[in-house]
Image: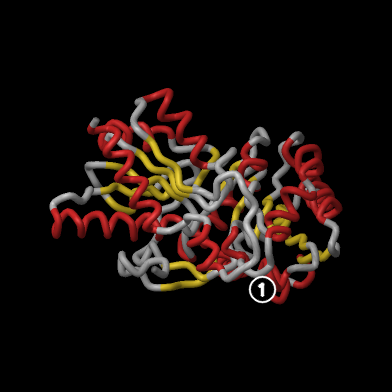
Amino acid sequence: MPLGEASGLKMGQATRDAFGEALRDLGQKFPDGVTVDGDVGNSTRTEVFAKAFPDRAFNVGIAESNLVSVAGGLAAAGKTPVAASFACFLLCNAYDQIRMSVAFPGLNVKLVGSHAGISIGEDGPSQMGIEDVALATTLPGVVVIVPADAPSTRKATEAMLEHQGPVYLRLGRVKVPVVYTDGCPFEIGKANQVRDGRDATIIANGLMVSCALDAAARLDAAARLEADGVNVRVLDMHTVKPLDDAAIAAAARDTGAIVVAEEHLAAGGLGQAVAAVVARTHPVPMRFVNIGDTYAESGDSEGLLEKYGLTSSAVQKAVREAVAQRQR
C-alpha cells in the first residue's frame, strides 16, 4: 500500500526539495549563510540557493573530507556554512573531519545528508545512508533532526539555521505524504503528537511518520469493524538528539506499549534511544520496526520498503504484538 493511503494523506515533495526551497527563501534572513557542496548540488538541492546567491555558494568537488574542513573554516571565520552531500558520503567518508573540525570545537556548521535510507532505490547499497543517525548522535553537542515531510522540513531548516552549534539534518530522495497540512509546530528537542490514542504509541521519524499514521488508521478501523483494533497515539520524533524524554515517558505511562519505526539500522538509531528513556522512566513492552542488521540492495523504493519491512502492515503487526505482551 502506498505511503499515506490508509490515513488519507496526499503526496507532497521530497524533503530534499523542500530543504532547497527553504534555504533559498531564508537567504535574506541569514545573510552569513553559505553553502558548501560536494558536486551534488543538483541532488541535495543546494543549487536552488546557489542560483539565488551565487557568491555565497561553494562547490569543493567530490571530496567530502575537504568539504567538511572548508565548512569548519568558514564557521570559524563567522559564517554559517551548510555542508551538504549524500548522507552516506558525508557521515561515513568524512566522519573524522566532522569529529575534529566541527563537533570537537563546537563550530556552527550545518551538516545536511540527503538521499538517506533505503528509499533512494536503484542507486543501491553503496549510496544508502543507513547508519548516519547512529554516527551523528555519537558526536557530543551535535543536534540530529529527521523531518517527516515538506512542511516540517522547511521549519527544520529554519530551526537549524537559528540554532548556534553543529546540526545534522537528514533528508530523503523520494516524495513523501504531507503529514502537516495546516502548519507545523517545530521546536528542536520537542516531539509533535500527530495523533492521540490510549492503547499504544508509535514513535517515528522521517517517512515512517506517514507509515505510522497509516498503521494507526488501519488499527482504528479494525476497532470499529471487528472490535479487536487498537487506538494508537503517534509521535513525530523529528529530533533524535536531543530527545524529547518527557513525551516518551508520558507515552509509556499513558498507553502502556510503544513501537518505534525508522528507516535506519536497528543499531544506534531512534529505537535504541527511545528504549533507553523507557527503561529509565517507565518500562513497557516495546517493538521496533527498522532495517535490522543488514545492507539492502538495488530496487525501486516501494519494493525495497516492502522487502525490508518498512510498511504500515509491519508497524501494525508490531503494535499488536506489544499490546498482546502487555495484556499477558
Q: Nearer the viewer, residue 181 or 86?
A: 86
Residue 307 seen in this snapshot = yes
Identify the residue shown where x is 65% and y is 48%.
132
Identify the residue shown where x is 22% and y is 55%.
220
x, y percentage for residue 233?
A: 29, 47
x, y percentage for residue 82?
A: 70, 56
Q: Secondary structure at mark 1?
A: helix
x, y percentage for residue 204?
A: 44, 49
Instruction: Report whether 112 appears left or right of 206.
Output: right
Residue found farthest to the top: 280
Q: Quadrant of residue 4?
A: bottom left
Total marks placed = 1
Quadrant housing the C terminus:
top left
Check the image and report above or below for 229 versus 301: above
Check the image and report above or below for 58 versus 92: below
Identify the residue shown where x is 38% and y is 58%.
312
Quadrant housing the N terminus:
bottom left
Instruction: Report whether 114 appears left or right of 192.
Output: right
Give neighbour class at mark 1: few <14, some 14-19, many 20+ (Cα, 10 Å): many
Residue found farthest to the bottom: 51
Q: Nearer the viewer, residue 13 or 32?
A: 13
Identify the residue shown where x is 36% and y is 26%.
283
Q: How is the image coloured?
A: secondary structure
Task: Name the amino acid, label 1.
Answer: Val
Tag 1 residue: 48
Residue 33 seen in this snapshot = no
Q: Nearer the viewer, residue 117 or 24?
A: 117
Check the image and report above or below for 293 versus 64: above
